[in-house]
Amino acid sequence: MCYNGQFEVDGKEQVLVAADVVQDATDHGELEPMVEAVEKNLGELPVEASADAGYSSYNNLEYVQEKRLDMYVYAGQFSGVIGEEI
């Protein structure tokens, strides 16, 4: 059993705007629920977000593109995809 804390912070105000604890070892499936938690808590989607490489997946790239969210994440495994339409 593992616990994985998820936290979203407002970059300007430096306050938590969403948090959760999940039992998944990776972050791949956590981007969408956390963005939706931010939207629920603040009444609007974030304009941009940053994340570590654990959030780097094709599903997350498609999700941020669909939501028109500027995402800053390590994209080593997507080096041939970045800057192109998915």
Image (cartoon, helix red, strand yellow):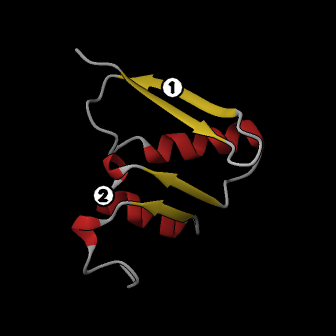
- Residue of label 2: 57
The amino acid type found where label 2 is placed reads Ser
Q: Secondary structure at mark 2?
A: loop
Q: Quadrant of the N terminus?
A: top left
Q: Quadrant of the C terminus?
A: bottom left
* Circles 1, 2 touching at the beta carbon (< 8 Å): no
Image point 63% across, 39% down: which residue?
A: 9
How far across and down, in percent of the image, does residue 13 sit? Answer: 77, 41
Q: CA distance from mark 1 to mark 2?
A: 20 Å
The amino acid type found where label 1 is placed reads Asp
Tell me the number on the disc at residue 20: 1
Badge 1: how crowded within 10 Å, few (<14), some, or many (20+)? few
Q: Identify the image quadrant of residue 21.
A: top left
Image point 67% across, 61% down: which residue?
A: 47
| 68 lies above or below 4 | below
| 67 lies above or below 3 | below
**Left or right of 81, for residue 8:** right
Badge 2: how crowded within 10 Å, few (<14), some, or many (20+)? some
